[in-house]
Image (cartoon, rainbow, N blue to C red):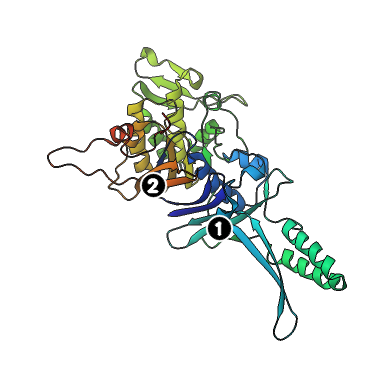
Amino acid sequence: MIRKINVENYKSLPKLCLELGRVTVLIGANGSGKSNILEAIAFASAAAQNKLDNEFLISRGIRVTETQFMRSAFDKSLTVQHEAKISRQKDDTSTETVRAQGNFIKITVEGDDEVAFECELYPDEKTSYPRWRQSVPIQFKKAHDALIASRPENTQFIQELIEQAIAGIWQDRLTRPAGSLPGFLVFAPENSALRTFQAEGQILPLGIKGEGLFSHLKGLDSEHNRERLENIRTRLKLIEWFESFVIPENLSPGERVIKIQDQFIPGGVLFDQRSANEGFLFLLFYMTLFISPETPSFFSIDNIDNSLNPKICTELVRQINALASEYGKQVILTTHNPAVLDGLDLTDENQRLVVVDRDKKGHTRVRRVDPPKPTAGKQPISLSEAFMRGYIGGLPKNF
């Protein structure tokens, strides 16, 4: 299980350390940096596969922008600096050194026993995506030109040093010990993709917006996975009217339909997903995501409360904790709904609530919320009430 994420120099995160449980909920005001945290982890996962093109980043849930805006824009003295040294021994007592520095994004993911993944991204302002290395880093080019101007007789030697630096010091900086970071995605399902059962996207088996849900459900409707499919049906009883659903046989090519049974409609009349309410579709997606053996073991869901009644939000988080433990999943959730917090048991180390906000300099910071302590003779107030009263932070402060 992933225990800790360290991010340096990414957007609003000049330096941040987030310690995780099996289920971690992030709360905070709009623009506090919750999504930036998720995107940084997704960046590291994309880097693990060396897939940093825009199309692949977007399909993982990363908001792609010009690369200079991916790096932290705060005081550069606060950002990560990489120093490369090129040295030549002049004689027994002195050495010539060319030094160069450059800003980069560093993401470290720590597992149970070791660093699961570490990457350094060097955004190139001439392209639309970060690169592992530039063919001729501009810092070295400037040092190279300046040194040749002052020592033209040493041009060949200096050029060899630059080439060595590019091949060595500025090589792809990537560490992937055993147990490297799995395919982390930022899921943010959308009603349109779920209602129409949009076909598979670039990411399989489920896309971040809900693409591929029908095909995956159909794949689960087999003897090997039937128990999991039945568990999905059982968990959907969170919706009061829901009785069951079936995947029709002999569908025509390209037809993507499930038939749903409403316990209040007599005569066994069934309807398809296009007539179901949004809450049902979102729950169908979430339950499939956690119960399926093919979905990632570590992922996030942005705005888990989308389209759901507050009481369902509370129970959904309780069930997510049970499902994550049962099926070996780990998840980071973001929310703005106080009811989500009431589904957490903060006395359990595997369940964590983290407040995300920005300090006076605008830097995103995180703070874990401790379990509430009862006052003598009184019951502790709920987490949702403590949140709304401003006791645990995470609310706007400008009004």
Q: Is residue 372 visible?
A: yes
Residue 213 at x, y = what percent?
53, 32
Residue 19 at x, y = what percent?
41, 52
Q: Is residue 2 visible?
A: no
Q: Along the line of sight, which residue is nearer the eye, 390 or 128?
A: 390
Q: Residue furthest left?
A: 377
Say if mark 2 contacts mark 1, CB within 8 Å.
no
Q: Along the line of sight, which residue is nearer the eye, 53 or 374?
A: 374
Residue picked out by circle 1: 118
Q: Looking at the figure, which quarter contains the C terminus?
A: top left
Q: Residue at x 51, y 19 (%)?
A: 274
Q: Residue at x 63, y 39 (%)?
A: 64
Q: Along the line of sight, which residue is nearer the eye, 117 or 382?
A: 382
Q: Which mark is residue 74?
A: none
Horizontal side, residue 121 vs residue 247: left or right: right
Q: Residue at x 52, y 62 (%)?
A: 178
Q: Residue furthest top?
A: 266
Mark 1: secondary structure: strand
Residue picked out by circle 2: 367
Alpha-carbon distance for marks 2 and 1?
Answer: 23 Å
Task: Judge the density around disc 2: few (<14), some (14-19), many (≥20) Cα neighbours within 10 Å.
Answer: some
